[in-house]
Image (cartoon, rainbow, N blue to C red):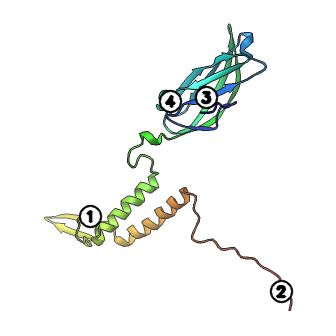
Amino acid sequence: MATETEVPESFAAGTTVKFTITDPDHPADDGWGMNFVLAGAGVLSSTGQATAKSHAFTLAATATAELPAGSYRWALTATKGEEVEEVDDGRLTVKPNLAAAGAGDLQSSNEKLLAAIDAMIAKRMGTGTGSLPQDIEAYSIDGVTVTKVPLEQLQKSRVVYAYAVNRERGGGIGRQHRIAFTRGDS
């Protein structure tokens, strides 16, 4: 893994992250130490190792594995004796640890709802696994009434969630056509 020369903009949880900070106002060979703190859905801190004038940071894979995916704030502080100065701060993104993900863990709520709607429609149509058509939308037995979501409403909901999933994945609406208007001479 290459060592970055600044705090990375993103990294995947469960990976080793290395970066080196060189700050002329807080050189390691002048007795300055440097600390890195990451805070968001999880927290992580690291102390830089002095290397000539720079501070080298290594975030171990075991430490980053504990971080939930999401947006985080980070800060670098320099210390020398009793003196503490903020050097820099920013935001970064921790991407999910794909190696530790279970089935469905990384699906958005829209993807989960779309799958559930598809399963309900398939069951209603009798195309679900080992199912007979269940097209009855309401029934009563011994005074207990059960009303299912109408198939028409499920189909409308499916369109809404399919559109949302398509947008999450970077898609647009339908096919795109390029149209050019030109002025014709008559």
The residue carrying mark 1 is 129
The residue carrying mark 4 is 61
- Tell us which disc is closer to us: 1 or 3: 3
Where residue 109 appears, x then y in whole percent? 44, 52
Tell me: residue 11, above or below residue 89.
below
Image side of residue 39 versus residue 155, left or right: right
Kindly report the distance in space between the C-alpha atoms of the residues bearing marks 4 and 3. Answer: 10 Å
Kindly report the distance in space between the C-alpha atoms of the residues bearing marks 1 and 3. Answer: 49 Å
Q: Nearer the viewer, residue 52 or 178?
A: 52
State the residue at coordinates (23%, 67%). Answer: 131
Image side of residue 155 versus residue 143, left or right: right
Kindly report the distance in space between the C-alpha atoms of the residues bearing marks 2 and 3. Answer: 61 Å
Dot placed on the residue nearer the N-terminal end, 4 or 1: 4
Q: Nearer the viewer, residue 42 or 139?
A: 42
Kindly report the distance in space between the C-alpha atoms of the residues bearing marks 2 and 1. Answer: 59 Å
The residue carrying mark 2 is 184
The residue carrying mark 3 is 18
View extreme (right): residue? 185
Amino acid type, residue under disc 2 in the picture: Gly
- The reply to whether callout 2 and callout 3 are in contact (CB within 8 Å) is no
The quarter holding residue 57 reads top right
